[in-house]
Amino acid sequence: MSSVSHSAEHATTTGIDHRKLLIWAFLGSDCLFFGSLIATYMIYRGKSIDCPLPHQIYDIPYTSISAFVLLMSSLTMVLALAAIQRGDHKGLRVWLVSTGMLGLVFLGGQFYEFTTFVHEGLTLSGNLFGSTFFVLTGFHGAHVTVGVMILFSLVLVSMRGGIPASDSLTVELAGLYWHFVDIVWIVLFALVYLVPSPVPNIECAQAAVAH
Amino acid sequence: MATVTGSLAGVVPRPNTEHGLMGWLSTVDHKKIGVLYGATSFIFFLLGGLEAIMMRLQLAAPNSNLIDPLTFNQLITMHATTMVFLVVMPMSAAFFNFLIPLQIGARDVAFPRLNAFSYWVFLTGGIFINGSWLIGQAPAAGWFGYANLTSKTFSPDLGVDFWLLGLLILGTSSVAASLNFIVTIVNLRAPGMTMMRMPLFTWMTLVVAFLVIFAFPVITIGLIELGFDRFMGTNFFNPAKGGDPVLWQHLFWLFGHPEVYILILPAMGIVSEVLPTFSRKPLFGYSVVVFSGIAIGFMGWGVWAHHMFTVGMGPIANTVFTLTTMFIAVPTGVKIFNWIGTMWGGKLTFPTPMLFSIGFIAMFIIGGLSGVTHAISPSDYQQQDTYYIVAHFHYVLFGGAILGLFSGIYFYWPKITGRLLDERIGKVHFWLMLIGFNLTFAPMHILGMNGMPRRIYTYPAGMGWEFWNMLQTAGSLVIAVAMLAFLYNVWVSHTKGKVAGNDPWDGRTLEWSIPSPPPAYNFATIPHVRERDDWWFTKHPELAHGSHGHAAAPAEAHHATTGGHGHEEHIHMPQGSLLPLIAGVGQTLFVGGLILGPVVMAIGGLMMVGGLYAWCSEPINE
Amino acid sequence: MTAQHGHDEHAGHPQPAEYIKIAVVLTIITAIEVALFYIGEAKDGAGHRMIAEGLVTTAIMVLSALKFAIVVMWYMHLKFDHKLFSYFMVGGLALAGLVMLALLALLPILHLGSEL
């Protein structure tokens, strides 16, 4: 799957494959994407003038489990790559499917969490917290969704014999994207859920929200 | 001969031709894509110019009712949005596309289909955003779209929606193209072409590409937040719920300032090629010019809030940004001295490309100087939102970027088309443009100092503004005449222009070592580069110093020029493909579907996803 | 293209067992982070936090940065790969971080109900 024209030159100036260079440049760019969204979230932390607020609505044990799920999906992803690098096609598919399934579990967990929050009064338009929270975690979820689609597509390609052991780059590139999505969640889990959020001086802040 | 091989699900045939409409629609050749960018951006230039003339006609006299206030606001918004995103950036992209592989000794960019995709997204995005004119709902909130004028409350019609979706679409085109150029420049250089032997235009392209991939995500988030506010009722810029409209300004200008360097650096790159050629001397202080370009790229991230001095950030913030803005004048000034140093003591000739490059330097200095006056935040309090600012950015963007791009057009026209543009008509074009430009924009400094605000559709009599406004309108008409001269020149060149040959200017860099226009495969044999300006020293070994490592005897032909026809059969270039077009159009329809309706969105989505999947499974050649 | 991957790089490639060990480390760090959350929430009789908020925040951020670095360096293989990738990633990260800090410094939002 050469991406260079079939002239005498197959080598690249750096020795790196074009596609790997492209993905890393893309990931560097994606840092600014999430960085700006996270910055918006951080700026607006503690600035809502309506409830509900984070401390009233977060279910830390629940979110911790879903964070753990995504973390483990990075393990299965790296095991998938290791499998194809030693020529184990079945192993590749098993670990790719595992990664995709863990991703789906994470997404399912997000969906459940979001609907619970909405039932408890947190909406996109209700207050600043709702706007920033849903858009930030929503775009992360969208990235995860794209990742899951890529992973299952790779399983199909592998089943058609399209991933030789000698050229596992596509799996590696998918892995890089997947790990990136995981590390963004590592940051989000800490900054959005765990780090104490200032409580604005508004009346409803002291009230408990029905769970 | 349109043989069809391979197909997508038996539905979309894979073309295999370079000719006719299908050849253009399916091209993955960087040179043709460059021509597409150039022609399309030129048409948008005429459109943006028309919008400017209309504004100038309205402003020629006080209390004018030629154009109503809403239409005027639409004109200022669309003129600027068009010029920035649909003219200067894509015109620069035309040069990136055509030149980069030639300058680094490569046969194509790293990702030819991604390259084509970028073009189709640009074309359809530009059509989409201008489509708003057709329903009388062009955006009217300025090209910078300040919140919360852009909220649904204060801009209820579809204009801002067209604007924000259009920019999101165009952003993907720019980022994709920039990723492509980064990989191309890093990874496809000919043997011996180290980073410090690359032509300066290639260096500037690399810096610009990094600026794009890092700056566009920031505005993407701003636009997404604005879009969510408008479509989903979120509160990012809603003061009633605690949102801060100033956040928009920060996000916009964090992108917007690197953006102006994205706009100017390619033109600076062109000028850095033209001046040495017509001074018959190498660029003075090449390494310093490279590092200045890189420095501008880095420092450009630290100055954005100078667009916000009057917002009320406080004296500490204002002072910090005053300092950073003054500092960034340094590397820019360094480049100007190096250009002057290039010409100093050179054997100068003044064909049209050289005139435009010198014009660039002069006009850019003026624009830069007014920029320095803005940098001082207390004095900016008087200048902000007046015509003085309008003068500044037109001097740097028109007097700078546009003149620089015209220098490139005249310089590279022979390489692209095989024929020269006419010199006499070229000089008429240049002088009319320079005079018209200065007539239009120089008085704006005075008007601004005399208190005329920006973005007003008319003004009262008796303010002392009438004379200058009338003069400016006259100047804008002179610019229009200059453009007619250029169009005439294009026609003359096409019908009876002088055949250029490989190297009409006795150029210095690799693109001049191959035929004009170049064959599809660019180089019959990939060159081996021994030094900077390798082509020049191959032609003129007597000019080489010992340190360049040239033998005194003329070098053997390391560069195949017109020879090597037998090699053509062995060079396989990537086959064309319709998938970039399908995926690109699909993406525009998908995003545009948020305004155009769910059916459009569904069709677009299918084209986009289907196109992308097919693209991933399509081999380079069938 | 197969040569590009550099078989020499793979000589040092971790075995699955190493990856699992890394996963265990990541899990432990996550558990500590969650524990820190609860420690931070612990309040005395008067309703004040027993441990300073800043301390808890810093500790959680340091730990999450550590997890981030581990995944990037080992799972994404950045530690062992061509340093050009590191420049791209670290460059993007550094810029994102600076942008965040600058925005936080520049935007004290003044309105009813918030402390400054």
Image (cartoon, coloured by chain):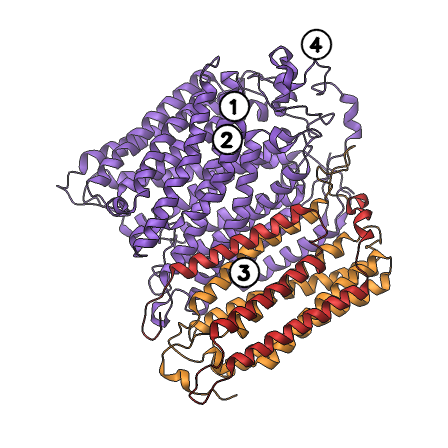
Chain colours: A orange, B purple, C red
On the picture, is B10 further left or further right than A122? right
Quarter holding residue A137: bottom right
The label nearer to you, 4 versus 3, is: 4
**Residue at mark 4: chain:** B
Under mark 1, the amino acid is: Leu
| Sequence order check, earlier mark of 4 and 2 | 2
Q: Nearer the viewer, residue A182 or B449?
A: A182
Q: Residues within 10 Å of mark 1 (few under 14, many from 20)?
A: many
**Disc 4, SS:** loop
**CA distance separating discs 4 and 3:** 58 Å
In the rendered image, which residue does mark 4 sit on? Answer: B553
Q: Residue at x 41, y 82 (%)?
A: A205
Compared with B398, A112 (above or below) is: below
In the rendered image, which residue does mark 3 sit on? Answer: A34
* Picture disc at residue B283: 1
Residue B391 spot, x, y in % from top left:
31, 37
The quadrant of the rendering that contains the C terminus of chain B is top right
Quarter holding residue B58: top left
